[in-house]
Image (cartoon, rainbow, N blue to C red):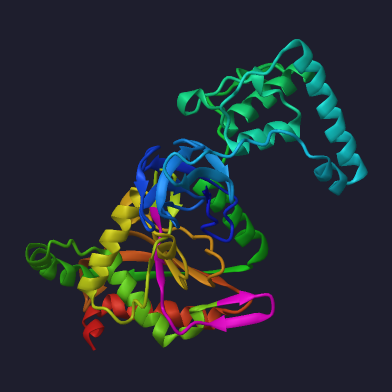
């Protein structure tokens, strides 16, 4: 018999939520078959079976959060006997703890034994992670109502119950209002940050706290670029079914500018300053779960059409939560665009471990004096945030100037 465990799908992953089972109990499984989908702190990933046999038992259902290496199911021979669940706390585990922890364990055991004398335990469905948390906090799971599949107790149920007990003990009123001075502030909702949003929070806090940003701004004439896009977009759409966007042009333009100013394509780890040869550009994509940055690899090599195809595919799958782990890793530079929301200019926080990020605003019209005549032109505001520890103002300015040159003279892209 084989344990099916929650795999560690990233360096920062501590747990994953099972989104969907592709097999049901009793199904025959071949090595390589997709067993289930798991939502990590970054993306939803399909998990394949390492074994062949029959799916004897699903331990954790859809919607349950499971810690890394936690058992989620068993695969074995047909009608093979399942292992008995070990619910006792071993003395050896207590002995391995320090004296304080041992006392806490013994206190919990004694308390549970006293409760069990008057309230015999029923078999309760509970996820491994929820059970672990309940044990650590000394919570009797018989008092918890499960909200998971088939009324299984999940992590959220345990934490909600623990919070309720704490409030009752401290005599704190529920969340209807918070007392401030003479009045009350009504609260609509309180949400625990988790998953992708938690990762974003941690990475952005780290970036602002540990990376000194230098921010450079440039106003660029985009009139010629608009003309080029207008002249080719319909032909590409009808011939290849791909809609070429300004972002596609910017990806290619940034790739060329990075090749010409390769110091920007770098990272700093402690005292180790690394300049990358590969130019892998991440494009920030908004999804229901938060901001995701899929990566387009070696952007200086493919043409505009191939970049557009790849970006379209990545964006669609990012918004559906269907990206693979390798598609959100190993980026060396990031572009973030808020122009579609009418934002004219903004500065972005560097996406570590990268050394720079380009923020792109909306394209807008403004008058420009040309050969004594005032004409309407189109402009775009670009803001480059750089890690000032390794990128000084001169290097950053040369990079931004090169981007401006390529936007204002887009025919240079074919050279």
| 130 sits left or right of 7 in the view | right
Judge whether residue 62 can be spotted in this image.
yes
Residue 16, percent from left and from top? 52, 46
351 vs 93, nearest the viewer: 93
Residue 326 in which image quadrant: bottom left
Residue 145 in which image quadrant: top right
303 vs 377, nearest the viewer: 303
Q: Identify the residue shown where x is 46% and y is 24%.
A: 150
Seen in the picture, residue 181 relative to 154 is either above or below; the reply is: above
Q: Identify the residue shown where x is 18% and y is 68%.
A: 229
Residue 415, percent from left and from top? 24, 89
Residue 235, percent from left and from top? 8, 67
Spot the residue most to the right.
99
Judge whether residue 367 can be spotted in this image.
no
Spot the residue most to the top.
118
Residue 197, percent from left and from top? 52, 47
Spot the residue most to the bottom.
415
| 299 sits left or right of 204 in the view | left
Residue 306 in which image quadrant: bottom left
The boundaries of the magenta stretch are 267-285
Seen in the picture, residue 323 relative to 152 is either above or below; the reply is: below
Seen in the picture, residue 408 relative to 334 is either above or below; the reply is: below
Marker count (numbered): 0
412 vs 292, nearest the viewer: 292
| 128 sits left or right of 87 in the view | left
Q: Identify the residue shown where x is 82% and y is 28%.
A: 109
| 330 sits left or right of 369 in the view | right
Asked if residue 17 lies in the magenta stretch, the reply is no
């Amino acid at each position: 018999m084989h344990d099916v465990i929650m795999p560690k799908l990233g360096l920062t992953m501590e747990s994953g939520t099972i989104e969907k089972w592709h097999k049901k109990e009793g199904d025959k499984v071949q090595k390589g078959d997709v067993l289930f989908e798991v939502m990590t702190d970054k993306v939803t990933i399909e998990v394949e079976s390492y074994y062949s046999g029959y799916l004897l038992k699903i331990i954790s259902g859809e919607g349950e959060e499971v810690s890394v290496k936690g058992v989620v199911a068993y695969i074995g021979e047909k009608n093979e006997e399942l292992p008995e669940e070990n619910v006792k706390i071993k003395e050896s585990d207590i002995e391995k703890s320090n004296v304080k922890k041992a006392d806490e364990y013994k206190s919990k055991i004694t308390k549970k034994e006293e409760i069990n004398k008057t309230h015999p335990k029923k078999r309760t469905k509970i996820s491994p992670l929820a059970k672990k948390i309940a044990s650590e906090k000394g919570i009797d799971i018989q008092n918890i109502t499960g909200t998971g599949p088939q009324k299984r107790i999940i992590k959220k149920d345990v934490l909600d119950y623990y919070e309720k007990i704490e409030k009752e003990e401290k005599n704190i009123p529920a969340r209807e209002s918070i007392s401030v001075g003479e009045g009350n502030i009504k609260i609509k909702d309180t949400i625990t940050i988790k998953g992708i949003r938690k990762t974003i929070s941690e990475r952005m806090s780290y970036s602002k706290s540990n990376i000194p940003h230098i921010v450079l701004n440039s106003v660029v004439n985009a009139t010629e670029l608009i003309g080029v896009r207008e002249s080719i977009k319909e032909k590409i759409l009808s011939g290849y079914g791909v809609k070429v966007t300004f972002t596609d042009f910017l990806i290619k333009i940034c790739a060329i500018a990075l090749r010409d100013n390769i110091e920007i394509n770098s990272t700093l780890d402690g005292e180790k300053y690394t300049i990358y040869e590969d130019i892998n550009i991440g494009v920030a994509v908004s999804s229901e779960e938060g901001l995701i940055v899929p990566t387009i690899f070696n952007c200086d090599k493919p043409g505009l059409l191939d970049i557009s195809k790849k970006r379209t595919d990545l964006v669609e799958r990012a918004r559906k939560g269907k990206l693979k782990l390798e598609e959100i890793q190993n980026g060396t530079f990031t572009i973030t665009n808020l122009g579609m929301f009418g934002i004219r200019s903004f500065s972005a926080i560097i996406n570590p471990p990268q050394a720079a990020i380009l923020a792109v605003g909306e394209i807008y019209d403004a008058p420009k004096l040309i050969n004594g005549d005032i004409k309407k032109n189109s402009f775009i505001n670009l803001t480059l945030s750089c890690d000032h520890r390794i990128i000084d103002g001169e290097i950053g300015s040369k990079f931004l100037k090169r981007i401006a040159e390529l936007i204002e003279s887009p025919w240079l892209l074919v050279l």
